[in-house]
């Protein structure tokens, strides 16, 4: 009678292979998670950029608001409330309008996460529309 099954060595090799695959995939997934978090900031920064462009079309570039979006006057000028700019990972104070070009009203928005669950670093939505 021959007993069929796996030997201890075979089981240990399988566990080793699974461990190596898990160790290699976790850092790759971590990068994907941060990328997904930054997509929230990109979408909100795009909305801010559009609101600045509308503001400039109605009021001129000289009156265009710049600075942090945590300032109530800036939010009001652009037609936002704090709730409009508050997401899962970013809050109004994380968005900063650094410049507005004249006469087309293209804004540059810098986003820096301040929440504990936000990704680290800063990203910029430039006047040309690139996200970096």
Image: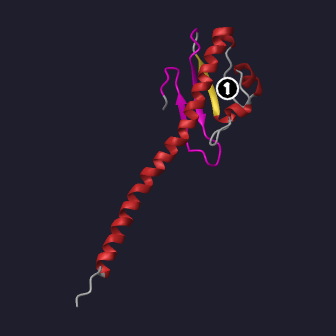
Q: Return the residue nearer the eye: 132 or 75.
A: 75
Give the image location of residue 19, x and y in percent. Answer: 38, 66
What residue does disc 1 label? Answer: 67
Q: Please determine whether, in this image, residue 73 is positioned above or below residue 34.
A: above
Would you identify the image quadrant in which residue 66 lies? top right
**Residue 116 visible in the snapshot:** yes
Give the image location of residue 20, x and y in percent. Answer: 36, 63
Magenta span includes 63 = no
Q: Return the residue nearer the eye: 2 or 62.
A: 2
Residue at left 67%, top 15%?
Answer: 64
Residue at left 55%, top 32%?
Answer: 42
Q: Magenta region, mostly helix, strand or loop?
A: loop
Would you identify the image quadrant in which residue 118 lies? top right
Residue at left 32%, top 81%?
Answer: 8
Quadrant where the N terminus sits is bottom left
Horizontal relation, residue 47 to residue 2: left or right: right
Q: Residue furthest bottom?
A: 1
Residue at left 63%, top 18%?
Answer: 52
Which residues are drawn in magenta?
A: 103-130
Tag 1, which secondary structure? Answer: strand
């Amino acid at each position: 009678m021959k007993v069929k099954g796996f030997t201890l060595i075979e089981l240990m090799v399988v566990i080793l292979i699974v461990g190596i695959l898990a160790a290699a995939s976790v850092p790759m997934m971590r990068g994907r998670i941060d990328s997904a978090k930054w997509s929230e900031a990109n979408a909100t920064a795009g909305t801010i950029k559009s609101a600045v462009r509308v503001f400039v079309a109605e009021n001129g570039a000289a009156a265009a608001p710049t600075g942090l979006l945590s300032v109530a006057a800036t939010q009001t000028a652009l037609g936002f409330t704090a709730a409009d700019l508050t997401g899962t990972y970013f809050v109004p104070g994380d968005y900063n309008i650094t410049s507005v070009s004249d006469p087309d009203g293209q804004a540059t928005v810098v986003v820096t996460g301040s929440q504990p669950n936000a990704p680290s670093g800063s990203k910029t939505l430039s006047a040309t529309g690139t996200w970096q």
